[in-house]
Image (tube, rainbow, N blue to C red):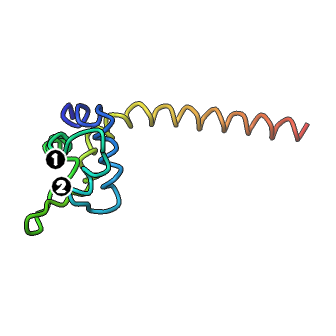
Amino acid sequence: MQAVLDAVAEPRRREILRLVRETEMPAGAIAARFTDVSRPTVSQHLRVLRDAGLVVERRDGTRRLYRARPEGFRDLRAFLEEFWDGRLEALKDAAEREQRRRDDDRRH
């Protein structure tokens, strides 16, 4: 999980993940989106994402194609849901209490 956290901590890596979330893209097309950094820098970002299990790399001739691996977030998601699920349950309980109160007020 630490590798995933480290990978997504960098804003450019999060943007790369957004780019390849829905479609596979060649490394060159990904790098072209980042005019403020060199291609080797983008390649390093892709390597970090790949090593963290967040993207998969596929070779097509001389091209390297990348796409997101949502399952790479599984452990992080499970960890965050430990906090989120409890909050959602508390919100649900509060909303149901409020609805019962309103229903009682209407009856009287």
Amino acid residing under circle 2:
Val
SS label for mark 1: helix
Q: Give the farthest residue toward the bottom.
A: 61
**Residue picked out by circle 2:** 56
Q: Is residue 46 above or below residue 11?
A: below
Residue 67 position within the rendered picture, expressed as x and y whole percent measured from the top left: 25, 57
State the residue at coordinates (23%, 31%): 6
For the C terminus, the quadrant is top right
On the picture, is 67 further left or further right than 84?
A: left
Number of the label disc, if any, that sits on residue 97: none
Residue 3 position within the rendered picture, expressed as x and y whole percent measured from the top left: 18, 34
On the picture, is 43 further left or further right than 73?
A: left
Question: Which of these two is toward me, 38 or 42?
Answer: 38
Which of pointers 2 and 1 lies earlier in the amino acid sequence?
1
State the residue at coordinates (45%, 37%): 85
Q: Give the farthest residue toward the right.
A: 108
